[in-house]
Amino acid sequence: MAQHQGLAKDLFEDMGRKVAEASAQEGDDTDTKVVDEIESLCMNCHENGTTRLLLTKIPFFREIVIMSFACPHCNLKNAEIQSAGEIQQRGVKFSMKVETAEDLNRQIIKSDTAIFRVEDIDLEIPPGRGQLTNVEGILAMVAQDLEQKQDERKEVMPEVYEKLQGVIDTIKQMSNGEKLPFKLTIDDPAGNSSIEPPTVLSAGKYSRHEYPRTAAQNEALGLGDSSGEAPDTDIRPEYHASQMYPEMPASAPMVNNVDEDDIVENQVYSFPATCPGCTKSCTTNMKMVNIPHFKQVILMSTVCDHCGYRSNEVKTGGEVPEKGRRITVNVNTKEDLSRDILKAESCAMSCPELNLSVEPGTLGGRFTTVEGLLTQVRDDLRSSIFDVGDGGDSMNATSKDKWGSFFEQLTEAINGNVKFTIILEDPLASSYVQSFTAPEPDPQIKVEEYNRTAEEEEELGLTDMKTEGYEEEDAATKAASTDGA
């Protein structure tokens, strides 16, 4: 682990060096980055120092502003980042399992709106200063912050000191690679944070999940309308949804008609919703469809006429089965790419031959074809990694070659030029792959049931779910509370 010692400090100081080097080279050629210098007050000695601002591109992410402050009087130095882009239409949550020393070098971008968590010790860092660092660096910074005023706590509150010191020691062991594995998560409602994905993906290793923001999150980001005034309903014509997506038939949906009658199969229902992109009113359309040899599913689609936001998702119904289901599909020909496939939100997908692993919740619920699903995975992953052109100004050549080879192989599979296997593992047994020989078994599809793990039961909320005998327990609880009163 010696080679990893000091990486956090080096990466933090490298932010300042990048700004200084770009400032020194400014004017040498037209492509050199522009550095803005601003005279600023030093909060340590109250003399004037210099703040430098640099707009740069980050691999696996987008443009950011690096800010570096230096005071020549007291030698105070500081560096932080802010997103140079707009608030994204959906929030994003990253999770990564740190299993090796190499994972400690994974780059992390934590915006000032993100919540950072170390799940194994239930440690949460609330939104605050934006940071560009790596896994080792952010853990070292957390330990350093927690160590402040520990000497005073030892004298005044020894019990608190002992508990906090145990947490600090554990975090230091994690940052040094002595305590592995552990899981990190970053939840950013603004969608402007990132964790560098590993070049070799495996089940449970890395996940990226987008989600619609709640009204409270929109208000915290300054997107909510708390004035009580009627929202502006003027439609921006350049983003009108009908120009990008076909309109629903005028006679099909009726607003808020869900509760009028029982839901009928193949009929479109609508209910009012709030757009997660612009927070204005929009309509969500819903349709129940019966998939042959499977079950009924609900297709949901939201289109905002104000900002052009669009989302679609598939929900499966029915009771929770006793066991999960694993579906293995052999894709041997181009015809196999046209199989209908329903990937539920709870389903994990993997392709061993393509070195591809998709965690539950990453794509949401999708009803498409094998080709369509792989295309979406490729496009989403490519936009996440190469969203800044060739991968940003600091992606090394080795990583570029690995990702380029990965995408080439994935494209070959989408074009039907290579054989591969798709494995769908769904603890709720709500996923489906079309059989070409139904109702007879398809030789290219293997379906097997498995017992859910305790972790899966906990994540799905099944551990605390009680569907039988809860009436008696509720009556006993009320009787006990009455007697106590």
Image (cartoon, rainbow, N blue to C red):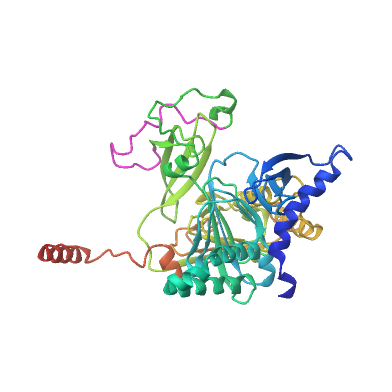
Residue 304 in view of the camera: yes
Picture coordinates of residue 88, whole percent (x, y) = 57, 42
**Horizontal side of residue 482 vs 200, given as left or right:** left
Answer left or right for 75 relative to 221. Answer: right
Q: Which residues are magenta?
A: 245-268
Q: Residue at x 57, y 28 (%)?
A: 239
Viewer-closest of 311 and 182: 182
60 in relation to 326, above or below: above
Q: Residue at x 69, y 69 (%)?
A: 102
In this view, the residue in front, 192 or 17, is: 17
Q: Say above or below: 80 vs 357.
A: above
- Overall secondary structure of the magenta stretch? loop
Provide residue 404's location: percent of width, then percent of height: 76, 55
Whether residue 256 is in magenta: the answer is yes
- How many tags in the picture? 0
Q: Observer-nearest residue: 257 or 208?
A: 208
Indicate the quadrant where residue 160 lies: bottom left
Quarter placement of the N terminus: bottom right
Image quadrant in which you'd find residue 359:
bottom right
Provide residue 328's location: percent of width, then percent of height.
56, 65
Instruction: Relative to 448, say whether 243 is above or below.
Output: above
Q: Position of residue 308 (x, y in %)?
A: 54, 32
Question: Which residue occupies the foreground of this view, 4 or 422?
Answer: 4
